[in-house]
Amino acid sequence: MEWQAEYKRDARNNYLVLKASEETEQEDYSVRMAEKNEIPGLLPMHISWRDGALFFSYDITSRQSLESLYEKRKMNWEEMTGLLSGIQETLQNMRKYLLSGESLLLEPEFVFLCPDTRRVFLCFFPGKEPGDSILSLAEFLLRSLDHRDGQAVALGYGFYQRAGEANGSVQRILEELLKNCVRQEPKPRILPKEPEPVREAPPEPGEAPERDAMAEGKEQGFFLFQILHPAVLLCVLGGVLGTEILLVFKILGLTEAGGLFFLILAAGMFANRRWKKKQEESEGPPRYVWAEEDEEEEEEEEAYRSLREEMYREDFSGAGDETRVLSEEEETRYLAGTGSAPAVRLITSMPGCPREISLGAEPLLVGKREGQVDLVLSSDTVSRIHASLETEQGRCYVRDKNSKNGTFVNGVRLQIQERKEFKEGDQVAFAEVVYYAVKKER
């Protein structure tokens, strides 16, 4: 079902506005219950009449839609379970007020989260016809999940399978899916066991001290040659012996002999250190074979190979029954910015902000939340996720992302989610942070 969403703002808050169906009545029990009560997990809602039609307004201030948050990021297992658990908790809270979960909008553009806490907020839309709302969410999760996380893949595909079942209740689907949903920690690595020493028969009385001394001498000698190269050791001993002979025959004085002794010792230490370094480089780091872990990875890869193929399969209408399987690299490539490169760049002189912004094929998220945006603007007036910069066919656009203090082009404030083109000479402002569009240097 296509939803015609509007975005409005007043002096302090931002709102998502949806037109109610013609069958929805203002005095309906669910409408009054959702409007008059602050139900955890539901966006605050109020109703209004305009041109004879009923509209629902939802307060979305300081919240971002699921679609916007994961426009470029991938969703791991923890984030997916947090989202599904948040929806399940909201459904449980709604039951206390005798509200039906079938009236929730689960399309990604209508599921909102707090960027800091990832708390989930949903739109309660009375009179909504049963449709593919949950299936739309499941398809979005498949596109957005991190395919390097095997448990995220299993959870996302399990949700997708259950969402496609006929007459599937959202509450029942989530209960079955999350009932035993526990993060499986990887098994500890098994280090190779040291070979057990061969136990010999106890020696005869009287022979033990001699054998023990011989064995100890061999071990000490072997250990000595592990840390000293035999050639280096012989050269040092020869040099020391030669110095002593020269000293005995008074060819060298005591001071000269001492200096020569320390020189030979230093040269031997240097040569031995070079030998140890080359030995370590030739041997390389110690290698361990984790047989059990490698087997598990192979089994997991085999289990999800067909799963990934199905998730990346596209059906092209109007092209017969042909089906093309996309690779992960093809699926994740952003193609909206194809065409000629943009001819302008943005510059500013404000401290704490990037002095220059060059636009490319991929959109750039702008805000002050480090780790969630591409360009961090260190200003208290900038929202955590404030706006996005986009290009299309060589043209440059800025889109407001539900910012609190607004995004402006030449002083004109953009509506929420509104996209506005800017050219050379225009002024683009993110709250109080002002950039100027200038010609890009060739």
Image (cartoon, helix red, strand yellow):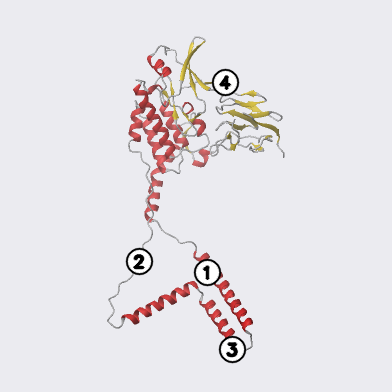
Work out which quarter of the rendered image holds the N terminus and state it.
top left
Earlier in the chain: of badge 1 and badge 4, it is 4
Earlier in the chain: of badge 2 and badge 3, it is 2
Q: CA distance from mark 3 to mark 4?
A: 100 Å
| Residue type of the residue flagged with mark 4 | Ala
Residue designated by label 3: 248
What SS does tag 3 mark? helix
| Residue type of the residue flagged with mark 1 | Lys
Residue designated by label 1: 276
Q: Is residue 240 visible?
A: yes
Mark 3 vs mark 4: give the one in front. Answer: 3
Mark 2 vs mark 3: give the one in front. Answer: 3
- Seen at 33% across and 67% down, the residue is 196
Earlier in the chain: of badge 2 and badge 1, it is 2
- Seen at 59% across and 84% down, the residue is 243
Q: Is residue 323 visible?
A: no
Mark 2 vs mark 4: give the one in front. Answer: 4
Q: Which mark is residue 195?
A: 2
| Residue type of the residue flagged with mark 2 | Pro
Position of residue 177 relative to residue 286, above or below, is: above
**Image coordinates for residue 307, horizontal then vertical, percent:** 41, 40
What SS does tag 2 mark? loop
Residue designated by label 4: 11
Q: Nearer the viewer, residue 319 or 139?
A: 139
**Looking at the image, do the residues carrying marks 2 and 1 touch, with CB atoms under 8 Å apart?**
no
